[in-house]
Image (cartoon, rainbow, N blue to C red):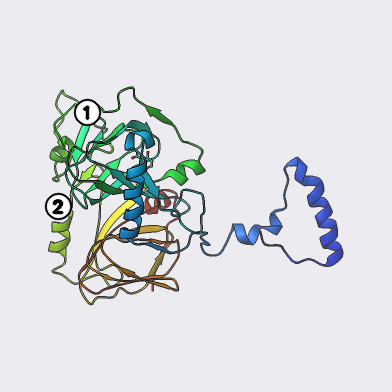
Amino acid sequence: MTTAIFPNDQRAQLEQLYAAMRPEGLAPLWEVLAALVSPTPQSPAVAHHWRYDDARRHLMRAGDLISAEQAERRVLILENPGLPDQSAITPSLYAGLQLIQPGEVAPAHRHTQSALRFVMEGEGAYTTVDGERAVMRPFDLVLTPSWQWHDHGNETAQPMIWLDGLDIPTVRHFAASFAEKTEAPVQARLVPDDDSLSRYGRNLRPLRGSIADRRPASRPLFHYPYAEWRRSLADLAVGAPDPHLGHALEFINPADGGTVLPTIAAQVQLLPAGFTTRPRRASDGAIHVVVEGTGTARIGDREVSLGARDIIVVPSWTRLELSADSDLVLFSYSDRAAQQRLELYREDRL
Ligand code: GTQ
């Protein structure tokens, strides 16, 4: 807390007032106003870099020590060093690396927190969302919208690891967490696998006759396969890159063209070999994952080298400049969706 400057006698009398009113739940705004209403964002989060291989080693060890069923979710939380013990990678968002070993099931539950999964390794394991399975491949994006039942399973012979991105700290901020479990750990399959991808994933939507659609009309799609988004990015990359973003595409909700989740926006970008972005800063706190290539991220006064599957966090209003050694493909998610809905979002292209 910052302390305002006052002459000594005034300060002494003010302190007496504060002491007298504190037990009655009263506090002076003038002591804290400058910190509360700062001219620019003052994030308690710091820039940080997780090397995938290092995180993976600890995750595999956890896999030896505890089962997915026992843990309910076997996840290593990516905790921002500026937000210790808060299970947060930014003030509003959560990130974790989840491991499902061959034959394991992470049992069905649902909660008000919205989630995305970005597959880091493994092929053929599934997430079932409200009775529909999405079979996952590396670098697929899969959503679990608020209050939809989800269980994860791996019937393949390889471990499956993905990055979980959730709005856990946002929901905690609003004290609006609700969660439920089912009796059976695995949901029944109600429709063919990837049914919603067939219906909504190709720039079409079902014509409604007398049979109502099963999924909520407002958020019908939950699987964005790597093969599809990578092809779009490759086709886009024949043109000139945006100076601040390179070639960038946002994942959208086909129902309204908006962000994939009400709180979380997700995007991919490709920076051609040798390209350096112009610096930019934005009020969203963002998590970036290296999909392909190598390069460098300059985040504020930090510089980190980016290798395969590395993860970085860029706090709000921190200058970011990205350089690609080889063609660099990044996935990222941020709280821009929530900030735009709350009319808070700003960016500054330098
Ligand atoms: O897979 O449902 O990393 O509920 C944290 C909370 C994953 C999940 C997390 C969760 C999940």
Q: Amino acid at mark 2?
A: Glu
Q: Position of residue 8 (x, y in %)?
A: 84, 66
Q: Which mark is residue 55?
A: none
CB of mark 2 within 8 Å of CB of mark 1?
no
Q: Position of residue 329 (x, y in %)?
A: 23, 63
Mark 2–mark 1 Cα distance, whole angstroms, equals 24 Å
Which quadrant does the N terminus fall into?
Answer: bottom right
Q: Amino acid at mark 1?
A: Arg
Left or right side of 244 for 88 = right
Which quadrant does the C terminus fall into?
Answer: bottom left
Q: Which residue is denoted by mark 2 in the rendering?
A: 228
The answer to whether residue 146 of the structure is visible from this angle is yes
**Disc 2 secondary structure class:** helix
Viewer-closest of 88 and 317: 88
Left or right side of 141 for 207 = left
Viewer-closest of 147 and 349: 147
Left or right side of 210 for 106 = right
